[in-house]
Amino acid sequence: MERDVFLSMGKAFGLEIDDPHVEELYSYVQKVLPTFKCIEELNLTGFEPFMPYPSSEVSS
Amino acid sequence: MDSNELYFSSIRSLSRMIQKKEASPLEIVEAFLSRIESLEPKLNSFITLLYDQAIESATQAEKEIQAGRYVGPLHGIPFGLKDLFYVKGIRNTSGSKIYDNFIPDYDSTIALRLKKAGGILLGKLNMHPLAYGPTGENEEYGHMHNPWNLDLIAGGSSGGNGSAVASGECPFAMGSDTGGSVRIPAALCGIVGFKPTYGRLSRYGMTVLAWSQDHPGPMTRTVEDCALVMNAIAGYDPNDPTSINLPVQDYTRALTGEIKGFRLGVIKEFFDLPIESQVKISFWRAMDKLTELGAIISEISWPIYHYGTAIASLIQMAEATSYHRELIRKKGPLIYPPVRLRLEAGVFISATDYIQAQRARSLFYIQSLNLFKNLDLIVTPTVPVTAFSIGTSSLVLDGQKVNVISLLTQYTRPFNLNGFPAITVPCGFSEDQLPIGLQFVGRPFDEESVLRSAHAYEQATLWHLRRPPL
């Protein structure tokens, strides 16, 4: 994530972007977000967002 | 009875003692309070101890039982609650000083059902701050300590539960599990920890970590005790929108000791990841024991498992940030720093990423169900390592440097993502005399098979009878 996008999103949420802690957060986000990229490798055609246990499935 | 025997008695044994009038609820509660008083300086399992209330409740239980109003096997039995189950009038910190003075004005369904079953609440148990971490470290209320070696983690987030039950401070405790937070401390402390199917137990009145992956669950010293607690707390609750309205069995009836012909699957991908050799050895010995008991073991493949951590972590992160958004904005600097980082990182997950992860979860769920076409249960190690030193952030295993959060949750988190029932029972000890856990996982709402298999294994071994050197 680009730094200016990070700062802009953080500010929009309400984080104190001038706080020195934000540097640590940026490093952490840079480390964590790429670990989620693998989800894009999955073929999700035909799959809707998960809903826990529709009643039909539970009763079957 | 020798007081040490009392501390390590099962719920079933204590219940029989009460019924036969060999011990009264008051005597039992006083004994456990005394045990807590002597061990707390070492263990730090409790955040709030309810001494006076427990004595009062035990006196009341004694009167009820003497008057012939015995309500069941939990009547007069002491227990603890992780400090995120609301109890009306009792402070609920969620493991964070930010909530040091928060007093709920209603009971969680779990607390209410245990009260109705006659249980005596001893106190609220220590936990990883906001339940957001698997180590049981808490700099604000003090770290939880493993009864088998006080320098080591108890595991988390329900670490106070693990140390309290394993050390004989209470016979059972209720925890919550979003990525393994019941099963991890149970495995590392050498007790039983059960995460029933999502929707089986009510989440009403619990502090949220991630709505769609939070599961309450009992932590006990035996599988039978787990079944007894389940009998008191399972069932539909209209206050929880994800609670499922299905009939609840008497779970103790599942404990037949018979697993001949049960088809158990071992997931080969689980062994692609770092795992301590002692854990691996204990696991395969447990497979030999299950084979001796008549189970049929086969190796299966679950390729999507390797995506599970990413899917579950993204969803958890987004939901936790959403739940705590006002806290992050208004009191960010007061949040335990490692938890603050994880909460704030959730701000940078987009709505479309979250929805994509929920779509991936549907695929993960279908592929999880497919595993059970030719299986009754999955069996895995619960945690790939034994307990390690408090303050450790990474370990080197199989030549790889691994972050401890990923490591501790690598075998438990997939079953929060699909919501399937999973239990851990002790299956061995390392050379350093540290407990090792074995996990059984079943089909959705098939708690009976999970409990039956875990019980059959437990009864065929002696691991659950070992006691920590306190």
Image (spheres, grey):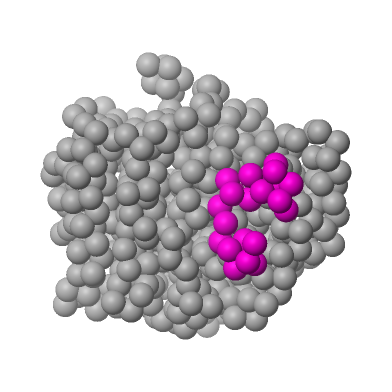
Image quarter in which the N terminus of chain A is found: bottom left
Q: Residue at x 80, y 45 (%)?
A: B61
x%, y% of residue B117?
70, 38
Tell me, yes or no, whether the highlighted magenta stretch contains residue B20.
Answer: yes
Residue at the image point whose x is 24% and y is 33% from the top: B260
Q: Which residues are magenta?
A: B1-23
User: Number of labelled discs?
Assistant: 0
Front-lying residue, B305 or B322:
B305
Q: Residue at x 63, y 50 (%)?
A: B14
Quadrant containing the C terminus of chain A in the rendered view? top left
Image vertical order of residue B468 relative to residue B110, above or below:
below
Instruction: Give percent across and percent down for residue B15.
Output: 65, 45
Q: Is residue B263 above or below residue B409?
A: above
Q: Nearer the viewer, residue B315 or A56?
A: A56
Q: Compared to B434, does B76 lie above or below? A: above
Q: Nearer the viewer, residue B152 or A14?
A: B152
The x, y position of residue B109, in whole percent, is 67, 39
Find residue B441 and report its image quarter.
top left
B26 to the left or right of B380: right
- Asked if the stretch drawn in magenta spans residue B91, the answer is no
| Residue B255 appears in the rendering | yes
- Residue under the image location 67 percent in, 77 percent down: B38
Percent coordinates x, y for residue B144 in the rendering:
55, 73
Left/right placement of residue B273 relative to residue B51 reads left
Q: Is residue B386 above or below residue B13?
A: below
- What secondary structure predominates along the stretch shown in magenta? helix
Task: Say which of B457 and B202 sits in front.
Answer: B457
Residue B91 visible in this rendered orientation of the protein: no
